[in-house]
Amino acid sequence: QQQVKQSPQSLIVQKGGISIINCAYENTAFDYFPWYQQFPGKGPALLIAIRPDVSEKKEGRFTISFNKSAKQFSLHIMDSQPGDSATYFCAAPGYNDYKLSFGAGTTVTVRA
Amino acid sequence: DAGVTQSPTHLIKTRGQQVTLRCSPKSGHDTVSWYQQALGQGPQFIFQYYEEEERQRGNFPDRFSGHQFPNYSSELNVNALLLGDSALYLCASHSGDSNQPQHFGDGTRLSIL
């Protein structure tokens, strides 16, 4: 059973600042570790995903850093914009498992 | 290219009733998973369907059942509804042989009165 711990629960950042969300998982896994962005009334939208044999992946203003030995991964949102205000979820696959286990979510508020 | 589509978007039921939710996967995807998301929480895995069979199940009672059709679309059925079943029900799809991340629909908001 994969357990995922996500922090912080919420954060407020000024426009142009950096948002950092951290996740830790328990069990080794080999499939993609995704991050999802969810707006109120919508489903989670895939933001960016990384395989555990890669230490960093960047897509535009979003970067995932992955530390396989520590079983931790994080999302950095650079140059945060008001439109980035949403709830972000990390997720981890299981070992020989088909499901995703999600963190509890981080609500990001970007002040203009 | 249509993404994952779910219907209906909202549903109101009373305790003891039964409900069926529907999902069409993203084009090119053959694997469908269902998740339950309570307010303020992360999605919880219900089960996954591949090749019309339930491949894995999460910690949900037998009141939750599903089906996958030959065109890869899927249904989630919940019997004997309880107040605690009120949640956003999410469908996710991916290609079973590619290990790509799952893509989610916008869900069905189920309210039990």
Image (spheres, coloured by chain):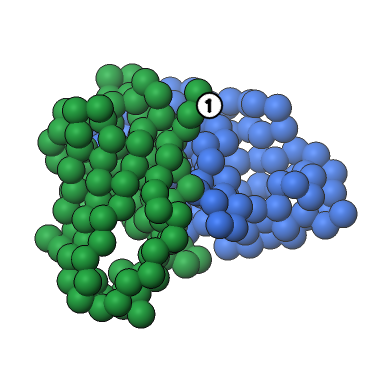
The chain carrying label 1 is A
Q: Residue at x 19, y 48 (%)?
A: B66
Considering the numbered disc 1 on the image, is that residue within a helix, a strand or a loop? loop
Image-based side of A97 in relation to A33, left or right: left
Q: Position of residue B93 (x, y in %)?
A: 36, 34
Please identify the quarter of the rendering in which residue B55 is found.
Answer: top left
Q: Residue at x 70, y 52 (%)?
A: A85
Q: Position of residue B21 (x, y in %)?
A: 30, 52
A2 above or below A29? below
Q: Position of residue B62 (x, y in %)?
A: 12, 60
Q: Residue at x 28, y 35 (%)?
A: B73
Q: Residue at x 22, y 71 (%)?
A: B17
Image-based side of A24 in relation to B57, left or right: right
Q: Which chain is green?
A: B
| Mark 1 Cα shell of 10 Å, populated few (<14), some (14-19), many (≥20) | few
Q: Which chain is blue?
A: A
Q: Which residue, given by chain and number where applicable, does mark 1 sit on?
A: A55
Q: Residue furthest right?
A: A112
Q: Quadrant of the C terminus of chain A?
A: bottom right
B104 above or below A61? below
B50 above or below A105? above
- Look at the image and tell me whether residue A2 can be seen: no
Amino acid type, residue under disc 1 in the picture:
Ser
Please identify the quarter of the rendering in which residue B23 is found.
Answer: top left
Q: How many marks?
A: 1
Q: Position of residue B110 (x, y in %)?
A: 38, 64
